[in-house]
Image (cartoon, rainbow, N blue to C red):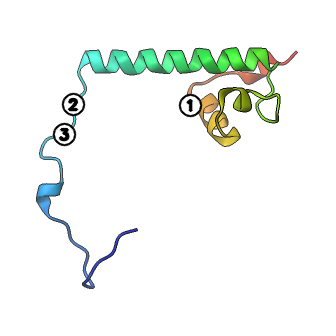
Amino acid sequence: MILCDTEIFSIDESWLPQQPLVMDSKHETRINRLRLQEKKAIEAALQECHGRVFGLSGAAARLGIARSTLESKIRSLKIDKIRFKS
């Protein structure tokens, strides 16, 4: 929630970053490694749950995350959840 004492909302320019954020190759490598680990964990959970995403015996419960979060991650990581169904 943002509260303002006047009709016009303004911010001090010193609050804004002065230079754009630049990622170095080490940072990108770490991010890619984390994405790969996340993808492997999700695929392992889907394998164990036979492709089931939600419910008490689903991958979301096994991973301890919300169904909608898992569905979003599956889409963003381009995981084919159907291949885990048996």
Q: Of helix, strand and loop, which one carries label 1? A: helix
Q: Amino acid at mark 2?
A: Val
User: Can you tell which mark lies on residue 27?
Assistant: none
User: In the rendering, at what x and y percent does residue 15 appear?
Assistant: 17, 56
Q: Of helix, strand and loop, which one carries label 3? A: loop
**Which of the two labelled residues, at mark 3 and mark 1, occupies the earlier sequence position?**
3
Task: Residue under label 3, please give it.
Answer: 20
* Quarter of the figure with the N terminus: bottom left
Q: CA distance from mark 3 to mark 1?
A: 25 Å
Total tally of numbered discs in the picture = 3
Q: Amino acid at mark 1?
A: Ser
Task: Residue under label 2, please give it.
Answer: 22
Q: CA distance from mark 3 to mark 2?
A: 6 Å
Q: CA distance from mark 1 to mark 2?
A: 23 Å
Few, some or many residues within 10 Å of mark 1 (<14, 14–19, 20+) = few
3 and 2 marks in contact (CB < 8 Å): yes
Q: Residue lying farthest right?
A: 86
User: In the rendering, at what x and y percent does residue 73 appear?
Assistant: 59, 32
- Using the image as rendered, state which of residue 55 and residue 20 is in the foreground: 55
Task: Residue under label 1, please give it.
Answer: 76
User: In the rendering, at what x and y percent does residue 2 appear?
Assistant: 35, 70
The residue lying at 67 percent from left, 35 percent from top is: 71
Q: Is residue 47 above or below residue 15?
A: above
